[in-house]
Image: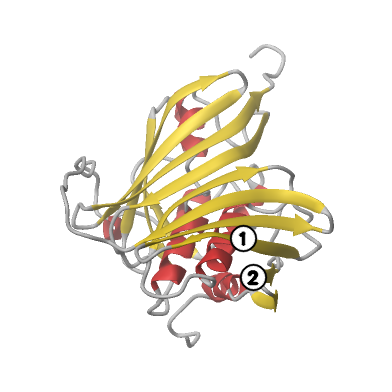
């Protein structure tokens, strides 16, 4: 892929997904230069998906992943992904991927691969939102908020993101609450013709905005409020083939928050309105109000 086809940040993400094969069903992944205090969950999920997919023969696309986060990763050290083969059938394949740094387990993921077949079909409808070309890019939404949101402003941005509603940090200024978030997304450039790469980039993006609706339901925002958040588990079901260098709408909401945890759900729709994937994420969400709030 040439630099004319992709942004530098997308090239960085694709390099992160080009795992080093270090042994039988074992792979090594690295971190980008732009990191936070711990490994980004979307990086773990996407790299683990690539590791699992590299051990599956034939045309069996990814069907579902279910991941649990155990420890925060050290962003200065590489990550080893070890794959266990649980099943290889004619239509199905099942894998378990465990991410390690030294002897410490960071993350465990089950991955299911399955041939697609004909059967019953139905899906919920895509929400009614403006088309992505009419919406400002993420950089415009962050303009003026760089001091409040240094982690977001300085983060790797391989995904072109267009909020169809005001994001949390802008809603905070208006006092508005919102029980859902709608964000158009696509890779910031052309992706290779490899369905596993498209699935991995979607998986990376799925950890970017999914918890937003927990905060906006309560009128809270990253950067403005004292919030500690960490992903506990993350699942994705892939329903139909897709390209992630085409626009998709990530529609998220939060059905419940309780016991210091929040649950968020998300649906990816093609621009034609087809439901492509479903996400469920649970995170630890702790809010520490300032005096007088």
The Cα–Cα distance between marks 2 and 1, rounded to whole angstroms, is 7 Å
The location of residue 244, given as percent across then percent down, is 37, 65
- Taking the view exactly as shown, the residue that stands out farthest to the bottom is 2
Q: Which mark is residue 25?
A: 2
Residue 67, given in percent of the width and then of the height, sits at 56, 46
Residue appearing at x 21%, y 53% in the figure = 274
Label 1 element class: strand
Residue 37 in sight in this render? no
Q: Residue at x 44, y 48 (%)?
A: 236
Judged from the image, the secondary structure of the residue bearing numbered disc 2 is loop
How far across and down, in percent of the image, does residue 142 sit?
53, 50
The residue shown at (29%, 63%) is 241
Which residue is located at x 84 percent, y 59 percent? 102
Estimate how packed mark 2 is, as few (under 14), some (14 to 19) or many (20 or more) residues with alpha carbons within 10 Å: some
Which residue position is annotated with label 1? 84
Residue 87 seen in the current view: yes
* First in residue order: circle 2 vs circle 1: 2
Query: Horizontal placement of 157 versus 131: left or right?
Result: right
Question: Where residue 220 appears, x then y in whole percent?
Answer: 54, 27
């Amino acid at each position: 892929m040439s630099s004319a086809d992709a942004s530098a940040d997308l090239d960085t993400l694709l390099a992160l997904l080009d795992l080093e094969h270090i042994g039988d069903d074992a792979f090594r992944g690295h971190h980008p230069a732009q990191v936070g205090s711990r490994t980004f969950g979307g990086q773990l999920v996407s790299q683990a998906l690539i590791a699992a997919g590299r051990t599956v023969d034939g045309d069996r696309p990814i069907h579902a992943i279910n991941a649990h986060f155990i420890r925060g990763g050290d962003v200065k050290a590489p990550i080893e992904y070890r794959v266990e083969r649980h099943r290889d059938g004619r239509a199905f394949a099942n894998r378990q991927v465990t991410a390690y740094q030294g002897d410490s387990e960071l993350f465990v993921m089950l991955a299911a691969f399955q041939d697609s077949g004909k059967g019953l079909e139905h899906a919920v409808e895509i929400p009614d939102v403006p088309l992505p070309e009419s919406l400002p890019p993420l950089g415009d939404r962050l303009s003026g908020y760089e001091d409040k949101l240094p982690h977001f402003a300085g983060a790797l941005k391989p995904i072109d993101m267009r909020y169809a509603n005001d994001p949390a940090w802008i809603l905070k200024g208006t006092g508005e609450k919102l029980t859902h978030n709608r964000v158009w997304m696509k890779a910031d450039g052309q992706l290779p013709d490899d369905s596993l790469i498209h699935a991995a980039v979607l998986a990376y993006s799925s950890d970017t905005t999914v918890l937003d609706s927990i905060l906006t339901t309560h009128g809270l925002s990253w950067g403005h409020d004292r919030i500690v958040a960490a992903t506990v588990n993350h699942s994705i079901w892939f329903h139909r083939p897709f390209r992630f260098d085409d626009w998709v709408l990530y529609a998220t909401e939060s059905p419940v928050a309780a016991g210091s945890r929040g649950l968020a759900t998300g649906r990816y729709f093609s621009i034609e309105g087809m439901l492509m994937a479903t996400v469920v994420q649970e995170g630890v969400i702790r809010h520490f109000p300032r005096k007088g709030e």
